[in-house]
Each structure stands twice: as structure tokens, then as C-alpha cells.
Image: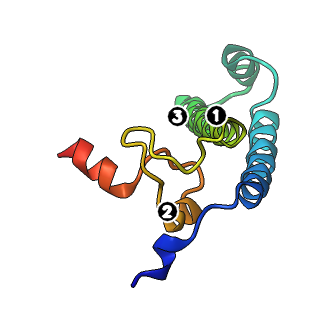
Amino acid sequence: MHRGSLRTVDPDEARQRLEAEKSRVLGLISEVRNELGVGSESDELSELSDYDQHPADTGSETFEREKDLSILDSLESELSELEAALQRIDDGTYGIDEITGEPIAPERLEAFPTARTNVDTDRRREA
């Protein structure tokens, strides 16, 4: 008999893990925002244009900024998923597959705490 399937998810433990991850992600968001600065891209690039730069330098800086913006977007999406998972704990629906209504495997939630569905549900949807 597979013992893992008999375990249930402890909402308090899940909340602690999600809150810790939320704090980590918020810290990363803050770091990326600080790295990006508060000025707009055109302000920063026009300031750089005062220097004798090769056009490729400006292109490299634009690429780096776009990469940072992409990272920021990804982190904000992750934060949104963490907040949604915390809301599901509050609602009493955390650990319940949003499509089938069946319990999500505790192992899946341990590996992927923001999971909304079981792996099998995802596979069936993709097929």
C-alpha cells in the first residue's frame, strides 16, 4: 500500500511554507525593482546618450533592462500564485483539485505548493 496517499496536507504547515516563499519572492521583486531604478527606460537611455557610446552598448543595456523586466514579471506572477494559494487555505479549498474536486497528492503540494490540480488532471487536459 502506498503510504504517501494516506497523508493529508496540514494547512498551518502549508501556510508557513507559502508565507516564507512569499517573503523570499517579495525580497527578489524589491531587488529587481531597485536594480531597474525609478526612471523610465527613455530617461536612462537618453542620459547614456550623452556619453560617446557605440550603438551596440545602448542595445546591450536595453536587452539587460528587458531581461530584468521579464524576471520582474515572472516574480510578480509567482507572487500572485502564492497569494492565490494562501487564499485557498483561507477558503478551505487548498489541496483540492480545481477541476476534479479530488484531493491533490500531498507529494505534489510538497514539491509544488501552489498546485491547483493533480498531475493526472494536467495530463488529461493536455491530451
Q: Residue at the location (49% across, 44% down)?
A: 116
Query: Alpha carbon of mark 2 to alpha carbon of mark 3: how far?
Result: 45 Å
Callout 3 amino acid? Ala
SS at badge 3: helix
Quadrant of res 65 = top right
Question: Disc 3 marks which residue?
Answer: 56
Name the image colouring: rainbow
Q: Are marks 2 and 1 in contact (CB under 8 Å)?
A: no
Query: Alpha carbon of mark 2 to alpha carbon of mark 1: how far?
Result: 19 Å
Callout 1 amino acid? Ser
Q: Residue at the location (38% across, 38% down)?
A: 99
Callout 2 amino acid? Arg
> Sequence-wise, which precedes: disc 2 or disc 1?
1
Q: Residue at the location (76% across, 20% down)?
A: 47
**Closer to the camera in the image, 49 or 117:** 117
SS at badge 2: helix
